[in-house]
Structure formats: C-alpha cells, structure tokens
Amino acid sequence: MERLMIEGGTVLPMTGQADVYENGVVLVESGRIVYAGPRAGAPFLPGARRINAVGKIVMPGIVNTHCHAAMTLLRGYADDMRLMDWLQTKIWPAEAKMTADDVYWGTALAAYEMLSGGITTFLDMYFPADAVARAIEATGIRGIVARGIIAVGGPSEALSRLDESREAFHRWNGNAGGRITFMVGPHAPYTCPPDALLACAELADELGIGIHIHLSETAGEVEEARRQWGKSPIRHVYDLGLMKGRHVVAAHCVHVDDDDIAILAETGTGVCHCPVSNLKLASGRTPVSKMRRKGVPVGFGTDGASSENMLHILGSEMRIGAIQAKELEGDPAVFTAYDAVAMATIEAARALGMEAEIGSLEPGKRADIILIDTERPHLTPNHDVFALVAYSALPSDVVTTIVDGRIVYDNGRLTYMDGREIMAKAREAAARIVKS
C-alpha cells in the first residue's frame, strides 16, 4: 500500500470539539493513520503521495450503522405506504424474485452511492451473504454482513439461514484486508420466535461475533409485543438473554420507554438511528438525546433505499436527525452540530463496537478518510466547521473517499469498479424483479 500525505486542509480528527486543525496534515502508511494534526508537528514520511487538501475538510469516513444495501433495486418502487403493508404486499414478494447476482449488483450500487457521499463503513442486513461480501470486496468499501434471518416459515427455514450465515462467515470473515466482517442477523422479534432468537445467540457465541436486529420500530410492533409477551420487544429479547454478554446492534428503537433505555445502556447495545426512514414511514421519532444522556451509543443509519430512497448521511440523516432531536425536546441547544458529526463518525463506530479501528483520525486506526470540498456557494462562509458539515454539506461535496489507505472514490468515479456498469446491471435487475 502506498503512503499518503494529505496536506493543507481543515482536519477534523473527531477526538474532541476543540480539535480542529487549519492547514493540517494527515499521514497514512500501510493502510493506517500515522499522524493527524497541525502541519508543525507532522513527521516526515518519505515517498508519500501528496494530496492537496487546500479548501477541503479532511475528516473520518462516515459510518452507516444500518442498511439493506441491495434494496437499491427497489428504490421508488413502493413509496407512501404503511410499514407492514409495504413489507407484505410489495417488498417481500419482490425480494423473493431476487437472484444472488441481483443482490451483488444491488449491493455494488449501494456501495457506489455510499462511497460517493463519504460513507466508508456500513452494517448490512440482507441476503444472500456471499453476494453481499463479494460486492464489498469488489468496490473497496468496508462492510459488516448480517445475513437476515426470518423464521416465519418454521424451524427448518431458520436453520438453513443460520447454516448459510455460518458458512459465509468461514469463507469471508476478515477477507479483503479485514474490510469484511460479520454479525448474526435475526430480523426482529415479530419474525423470529424465541427458539430462533436463541439459536441466533448460540451461533453468535460459536463464531465470536455480535448480533444485529430490528427492535421497537413501530407503535404497532410494541403493542403486539405487549399483547403477546406482556412486555416490550427490548425487554423481551433482554429476558431471553440475547443481550447479555454479547454485542448487540439494534436498529430504530423508536418507541422506547425508560425501562427500555435502561436496558440499552446497561448492556451497551448500539442503536441505529434512521430518522429519515422513520419519518417517511411515519414510524415515529427516536428519543436520541435522552438515550445519549443515559450513555447509550447511538449512530446514524440510512435504512434501505426502498424506504429512505437515498443512502446518504451527509445532507440527509445528519441534518434531519439533528433538527428532529431539537424539535422533539423543544430545545435547539439539546443536540449540537458537533453531536451530529460525532454520531456519523466516532459514536457510530462505538455503536458498532469498532471504535478501536475506525471513526476518528488517530494514529494506529484504519485510514478511512474523506475530503469535502468547501469551495461551494452553500458552504460559504465558514464560521463553524461542524455546523458546515452537519447542516450545509451535501453528499456531492465529497470529492475523495479513502478506505484502508486506498483511494476508492475520486472526483466522481469509483476506482476499483466501473460505476456505469454497476448502474446498467442494477437497472436490468430492477426491471425484472418488479415485473408482474
């Protein structure tokens, strides 16, 4: 891997709100950060490729904590519907027609879109796992694969998907220089009965990995859980033992009470906050600030492109999520621009249990870095760089995306795949899938 010297930009290492370095330098060697800070303190790195970052913000890659990547193929197909009607009458029937190649191209399209907007890591819940892993390898993005497990068809269906998860883990985990990792992915308590959830926990323990699950996304889901089990979905999976001694990443957590939040905090469960998808599906508003005050690690997620429509956190989840958090508590100071940028980077990494490797620009961490061009009318002037990123920046302002020290997206183009081919293949697949 080549050495990189990114110089002259405004460096936001995300190690604290006071740590902003104008005319800063970031040095990269062997895929890891060697230095991030002021030019005056930068060591000499012989033979480094120099990247001129004057007029640009240099910051950690954005982390997408929750995604159904290949649902890019269903973007715009089933909008303006209620969640369960949307799933049962449109999404699940269309997904049943998808081949492994469809999922590969749909995931590649998602990776292209995410890299173009500065997302360098994503947690995906989809199927089949091999196709998702192949797309991660090919595009250069960093991804966590959680093969979605739905057990409504009975125990044999759940077992086959658990077996697929196990086999894919052994084939792919740690591949592509460590960019591909795994979690076990039970879809939700309403699609996985207790025996299936316990089987997922056993597999997670066997493989030494975490669990990704949807929890308390809608009011109807919570009401049904209380009718069926006499408790909330979060209390239900906690009492089953799923959250004890394992790292769990829970998507949505919109309809939660104080007991639920206490459980999330006690267990260190990471929460994926998907404000745009939740608003668009009228699912509700996650009490993000309350969770964070109680010590719950929370990061932004996009959800799938068939509900959110875009796989972007800049200009979308970050901006709307910050505004929503303020409105929810009736206090514009309760959630700051810095909070928003942190929730897209270091706090998102913490929610995934990856803060030792990604999420900030610190020596020894993976060199996942993005450059945002501020020479744009909507980014002028610059009174507060965090406000600029949180409230004004757009995905199209990202000009360079680096993963593991490799430039994977630069000035509108993917480096390791042909973006035009990806879009053409995705269009072909999408047309066939939705054809009745």
Image (cartoon, grey):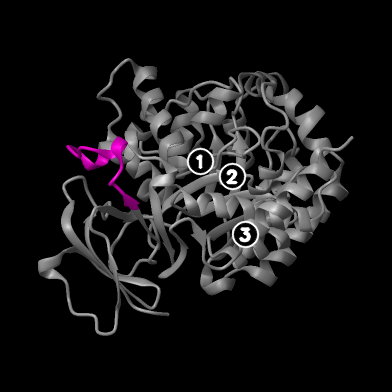
Region rendered in magenta: 372-386
Task: Name the one closer to the observer, 98 or 253.
Answer: 98
Tell me the crowding category of disc 2: few under 14, some 14 to 19, or many 20 or more residues within 10 angstroms, Cα based: many
Residue 303 magenta-highlighted: no
Q: Residue at x 40, y 40 (%)?
A: 394
* Disc 2: which residue: 67
What is the number of the mark on residue 301?
A: 1
Label 1: element kind: loop
Please name the amino acid that badge 2 sits on. Cys
Q: Disc 3 and disc 2: Cα gap in Å?
A: 23 Å
Q: Residue at x 12, y 69 (%)?
A: 41
Label 3: element kind: helix
- Mark 3 or 1, closer to the camera: 1
* Disc 3: which residue: 205
- The part of the image, by quadrant, that contains residue 203 is bottom right
Residue 380 magenta-highlighted: yes
Left or right: 298 with respect to 381?
right
Q: Disc 3 and disc 1: Cα gap in Å?
A: 25 Å
Q: Are marks 1 and 2 in contact (CB under 8 Å)?
A: yes
Residue at the outermost right position? 436
